[in-house]
Image (cartoon, grey):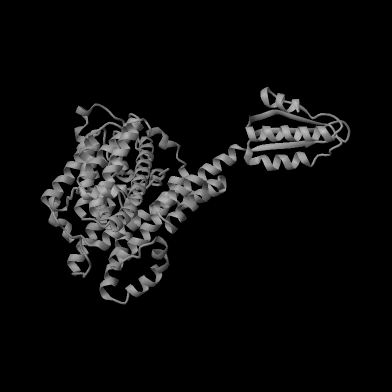
């Protein structure tokens, strides 16, 4: 399953640097330098995710700080970096809109506690069994909704509530947006930010020392100031003013079905993203592998703290994690120090956030949304595994059409059905030489899912001819098929010239031959 600030697909495009982990005492310079790089990558993303989620910008920084100082200290994955992720932006925005900001803290707190319980019960490795197609479909659906929603922010207009409405009304909204100077300037500023993000990777390596998101937002901010563009900017409350621990009354909402469903959705998505990100990060270095149960426990501790502070939920983030490895990090000290830099920035320079234009942050998330859609992988998947490609597409479209939680459940259900169907693959070959008994060879896994086809073929055999059924090639014969074969054999033996003969191993052959 796939994750950038939320991008599982980013793992397939990042080249391995094969960093080797060594003793902490000999690596502080590498870790220090890497922490600065990760801080510069994380800063605009933390703020952008918070604004897109409908919460104060400082709360995104709080989650990033907790991801560094709390989760970063815990065992699990040594080089993976945690913080607010674009993959949960849509769900966070819906939760804040429906239940309010105080209840968001309760949801995140419950999510963290549930992750801690699952980690303690060693459920972490089971998340590796989730179909990759479902996770990629989940991220693709998030990407589509994220793109549609943030394009409205780029144009300085309010987005509709549902995913389908966002997409359906987008062309008209963008056309109307160019009718006003403010909306036109905002959209052009956002488009320019996306252009910088796209072109940044093509510049010389010396220039790319500055992370693309930071450069894009910085240039957009500079353009806004120099040109005096009338665009919306980030509202600043200050770090302490933004922190709102959940009130006692907010915990009463945990009894509602909607809040409980959101907790489950947060837990499933955040845990899957984090553990798939861990698998991707493991491919980027030669150091110790991720201990999945401990990583799930660490994510749970981090989300519990975020919930107590009323901040956004966290996941492990592949873009920041990959930047950490590629910058030469050797130990967990780099991710802890990146949390220190975020804390110092939020405490000492909060006014700096007030000059950042919102269209630029929206553009960064539009760019992240596009990276969540596996367009190249989908074509190859369709050629080789059409069932997996179908699950991916249906999951993504279901998230757009219905909601995040229901879309993921639909994808999981389809994955289970597909697996059951493939596991029930069976072949029935009839050999009739014109004389002697008819040979019926059954091979594969004979389950109730293929029972109608098996019975149709057997019942079409001539009633006045002897039949020999060979079950030696059957790997699994379930109760439904065995009972149906017994009934068919008994009926055919009553009307035919002689009893049905069955050659097989163990119980199924004995039962059928007795008929």
Where does residue 355 sit, x and y in percent of width and height? 17, 61
Considering every residue shown, the one lying at the far top of the view is 506
Identify the residue at horizontal 13%, vertical 50% (top origin): 240
Q: Is residue 290 visible?
A: no
Side (left or right) of 505 relative to 371? right
Considering every residue shown, the one lying at the far left of the view is 348
Where does residue 510 sit, x and y in percent of width and height? 71, 24
Taking depth in this image into account, of 122 and 247 the one nearest to the observer is 247
Q: Quick one: quadrant of the C terminus?
A: top right
Taking depth in this image into account, of 137 and 195 the one nearest to the observer is 137
Side (left or right) of 225 relative to 498? left
Identify the residue at horizontal 22%, vertical 52% (top origin): 102
Considering every residue shown, the one lying at the far bottom of the view is 179
Q: Is residue 55 visible?
A: yes
Identify the residue at horizontal 27%, vertical 27% (top origin): 22
Considering every residue shown, the one lying at the far right of the view is 435
């Amino acid at each position: 399953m796939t994750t950038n600030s939320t991008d599982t697909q980013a793992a397939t495009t990042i080249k391995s640097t094969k960093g080797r982990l060594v003793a902490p005492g000999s690596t502080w310079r590498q870790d220090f330098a890497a922490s600065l790089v990760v801080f510069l990558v994380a800063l605009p993303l933390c703020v952008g995710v918070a604004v897109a989620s409908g919460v104060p910008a400082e709360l995104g920084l709080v989650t990033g700080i907790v991801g560094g100082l709390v989760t970063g200290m815990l065992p699990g994955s040594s080089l993976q970096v945690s913080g607010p992720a674009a993959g949960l932006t849509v769900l966070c925005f819906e939760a804040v809109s429906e239940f309010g900001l105080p209840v968001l803290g309760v949801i995140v707190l419950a999510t963290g506690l549930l992750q801690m319980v699952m980690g303690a019960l060693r459920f972490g490795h089971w998340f590796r069994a989730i179909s990759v197609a479902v996770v990629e479909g989940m991220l693709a659906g998030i990407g589509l909704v994220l793109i549609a929603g943030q394009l409205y922010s780029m144009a300085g207009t309010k987005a509709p509530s549902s995913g389908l409405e966002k997409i359906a009304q987008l062309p008209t909204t963008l056309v109307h947006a160019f009718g006003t100077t403010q909306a036109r300037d905002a959209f052009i500023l956002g488009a320019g930010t996306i252009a910088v993000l796209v072109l940044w990777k093509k510049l010389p390596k010396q220039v790319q020392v500055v992370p693309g998101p930071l450069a894009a937002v910085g240039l957009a901010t500079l353009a806004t100031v120099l040109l005096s563009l009338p665009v919306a900017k980030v509202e600043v409350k200050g770090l302490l003013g933004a922190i709102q621990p959940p009130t006692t009354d907010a915990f009463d909402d945990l009894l509602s079905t909607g809040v409980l469903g959101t907790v489950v959705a947060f837990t499933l998505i955040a845990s899957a993203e984090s553990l798939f990100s861990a698998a991707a990060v493991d491919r980027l270095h030669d150091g110790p592998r991720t201990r999945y149960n401990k990583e799930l426990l660490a994510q749970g501790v981090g989300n519990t703290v975020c919930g107590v502070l009323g901040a956004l939920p966290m996941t492990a983030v592949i873009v920041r994690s990959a930047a950490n490895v590629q910058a030469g990090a050797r130990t967990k000290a780099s991710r802890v120090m990146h949390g220190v830099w975020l804390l110092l920035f939020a405490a000492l320079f909060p006014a700096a956030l007030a000059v950042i234009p919102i269209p630029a942050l929206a553009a960064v998330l539009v760019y992240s949304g596009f990276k969540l859609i596996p367009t190249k992988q989908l074509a190859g998947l369709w050629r080789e595994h059409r069932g997996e490609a179908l699950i991916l597409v249906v999951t993504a479209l279901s998230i757009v059409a219905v909601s995040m939680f229901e879309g993921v459940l639909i994808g999981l259900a389809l994955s289970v059905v597909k697996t059951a169907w493939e596991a029930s693959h069976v072949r029935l070959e009839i050999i009739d030489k014109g004389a002697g008994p008819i040979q019926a060879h059954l091979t594969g896994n004979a389950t109730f899912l293929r029972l109608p086809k098996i019975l149709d073929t057997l019942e079409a055999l001539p009633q006045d001819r002897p039949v020999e059924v060979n079950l030696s090639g059957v790997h699994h014969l379930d109760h439904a098929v065995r009972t149906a074969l017994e009934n068919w054999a008994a009926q055919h033996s009553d009307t035919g010239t002689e009893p049905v003969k069955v050659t097989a191993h163990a119980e199924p052959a004995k039962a059928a031959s007795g008929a």
